[in-house]
Image: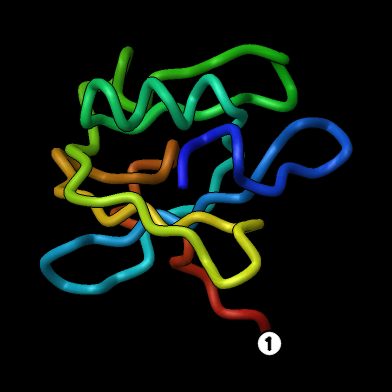
Amino acid sequence: MNASELTYNEQGLIPCIVQDAETGEVLMMAWMNEESVGLTLAQRTTWFFSRSRQELWHKGETSGNTQQLVELRYDCDADCLLARVVPAGPACHTGERTCFYRVLE
């Protein structure tokens, strides 16, 4: 399968869960489009699509907290991705290691 064969939503996006390849910890969730999937595979570092800015963003470009891609998996329906990565610093823009650091009461 290649990036063009994935199932994107009406906005041309697909959700991507990012997981630490060594620990299995879920680090973040972000959206990808076909271009960011291709860049991620080609450069072996994560690229996403910002819905608020309507543009591509390279994870860690300004913070230095990059994510080296180990593998990019897709689910049984080809409508969700799992990026297994080696992180270089925290995943969350708040400085937390993971975006999932809060518990819903």
Q: Residue furthest bottom?
A: 105
Q: Nearer the viewer, residue 43 or 18?
A: 43
Residue 17 lies left or right of residue 68; in this view the side is right
Identify whether 44 is placed above or below 62.
below
Q: Nearer the viewer, residue 43 or 23?
A: 43
Q: Amino acid at mark 1?
A: Glu
Give me the residue at 42% from left, 27% from top: 47
Q: Position of residue 97 (x, y in %)?
A: 29, 54
Colouring method of the image: rainbow
Q: Secondary structure at mark 1?
A: loop
Q: Position of residue 5 (x, y in %)?
A: 60, 41
Q: Nearer the viewer, residue 86 or 88?
A: 86
Which residue bears the numbered disc 1?
Answer: 105
On the image, which quarter does residue 40 sit in? top left
Give me the residue at 32% from left, 13% from top: 62
Give me the residue at 70% from left, 48% from top: 7
Residue 80 lies left or right of residue 51; in this view the side is left
Q: Nearer the viewer, residue 34 or 24?
A: 34
Give me the residue at 57% from left, 35% from top: 32
Residue 67 lies left or right of residue 79; in this view the side is left
Q: Residue furthest right?
A: 10
Q: Is the C terminus in the top left, top right, bottom left or bottom right quadrant?
A: bottom right
On the image, which quarter does residue 24 sit in? bottom left
